[in-house]
Image (tube, rainbow, N blue to C red):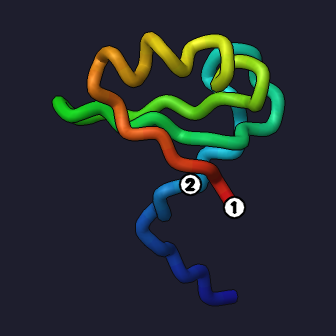
Amino acid sequence: MTIILEAPQQATRENCDRCGVRASSVATFPGGGELTFCGHHGRAHRDRLLAAGAALRPLP
């Protein structure tokens, strides 16, 4: 049997960083870093994320 090893692929983040349910948006910060949010937490933290300079975009 031949085993082929591949380099780890960057996983698509599909869970909210706050509560763990399916994410609907991602916030990218100007200094680097990203956070993903479900609809509830995205709305709850939207104003503070924008004030911090984060770019918000929906996930497909």
Q: Nearer the viewer, residue 10 or 3?
A: 10
* Amino acid, disc 2: Ala
Identify the residue under disc 2. 11
Q: Position of residue 59 (x, y in %)?
A: 64, 53
- Cβ atoms at labels 2 and 1 below 8 Å apart: no
Q: Residue at x 33, y 16 (%)?
A: 51
- Mark 2 and mark 1: span between their CA atoms? 15 Å
| Residue lying furthest right | 21
Locate the C terminus and report the quarter of the image it occupies: bottom right
Report how many numbered discs are placed on residues in the image.
Answer: 2
Q: Residue at x 44, y 11 (%)?
A: 48
As drawn, the label of residue 3 is none
Instruction: Examine the rendered structure and indicate whether residue 46 appears above or below residue 57.
Output: above
Q: Residue at x 52, y 48 (%)?
A: 57
Is residue 18 left or right of 45 when viewed as pictured? right
Q: Position of residue 1 (x, y in %)?
A: 69, 88
Identify the residue under disc 1. 60
| Residue lying furthest left | 31
| Residue lying furthest bottom | 2
Could you say which quadrant of the image residue 16 lies in?
top right
Q: Position of residue 18 (x, y in %)?
A: 65, 15
Say few, some or many: other residues with alpha carbon within 10 Å of mark 2 (under 14 / 14 to 19 / 20 or more). few
Q: What secondary structure is marked by label 2?
A: loop
Instruction: Examine the rendered structure and indicate whether residue 1 appears above or below residue 45.
Output: below
* Amino acid, disc 1: Pro
Instruction: Examine the rendered structure and indicate whether residue 4 appears above or below residue 11.
Output: below
Could you say which quadrant of the image residue 7 lies in?
bottom left
Q: Nearer the viewer, residue 36 or 42?
A: 42
Say few, some or many: other residues with alpha carbon within 10 Å of mark 1 (under 14 / 14 to 19 / 20 or more). few
Q: Earlier in the sequence, mark 2 or mark 1?
A: 2
Is residue 34 left or right of 33 when viewed as pictured? right
Q: What secondary structure is marked by label 1?
A: loop
